[in-house]
Amino acid sequence: MRRLPKVVRPRSRVRLIRADKQTPSWQKDIGRQFRVGYYSRKDGLDCIWLVNENGKYEQTTNRDFLLKFFEIEELSQEKNLYGIGKRRLGKIRIRNVWDRLNGKSSVDVYEAAKKIWEKDDPQKIRILIKTLKHGKRVVNRTAAAYALNLMHGRRTIPALEM
């Protein structure tokens, strides 16, 4: 089990990675990113507000559910837990598929690889080969190989054989 601070700070970034019988409505939302919103004095620090991609407070959860169903992508250092004097959280910048393929989160990297091979665009093979050869992390290179393996094109097999 991962170690989390007692209070997950606002502006921390999380991604939904699983759902079960307790949360069947989350099945369609797997892969979505959320940020932890500012806490409410009325609800207390046990009620974690999740802010969606558009900057809207969408749902609440608690620390146990956060550990069980979400991947913590980035823990914030925000000191102001209640958002007093702070602006509302804005939209999450949605990165393009190539930025995600070279990202740090393994879930994000493999979701990007899946999107690329689903489109099966032969013009994208060159970028995948570049990531395969020069990707900074093993997970990035592995995801590029995974996508190349499933794509159709003259250059995919020679690139994988290198």
Image (cartoon, grey):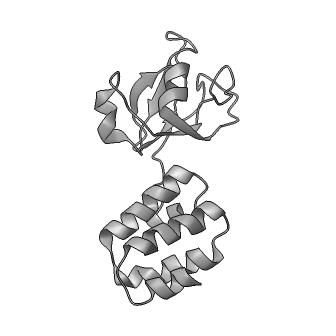
Q: Position of residue 38 (x, y in %)?
A: 55, 26
Find residue 141 and report its horizontal and vertical position in percent: 59, 69
- Is 21 in front, or is 10? 21
Q: Is residue 88 visible?
A: no
Q: Residue shown at 36%/28% (left/top)?
A: 20
Q: Is 32 situated above or below 26?
A: below
Displayed quadrant of residue 130: bottom right
Q: Is 159 placed left or right of 27 in the picture?
A: right
| 71 or 50, nearer to the observer | 71
- Please state, as top left, top right, bottom left or bottom right, where the N terminus lies in the image: top right
Residue 57 in which image quadrant: top left
Indicate whether 130 appears above or below 28. Answer: below
Residue found at the very far top of the displayed protein: 42
Q: Is residue 3 visible?
A: yes
Q: Position of residue 132 (x, y in %)?
A: 57, 75
In the rendering, at what x and y percent does residue 162 appear? 59, 84
Most distant residue in the bottom direction: 154
Task: Count how many numbered circles sit on residues in the image.
Answer: 0
Relative to residue 4, is residue 100 depicted above or below? Answer: below
Residue 79 drawn above or below residue 134: above
The image quadrant that residue 118 belongs to is bottom left
> Residue at 67% across / 68% down in the picture?
136
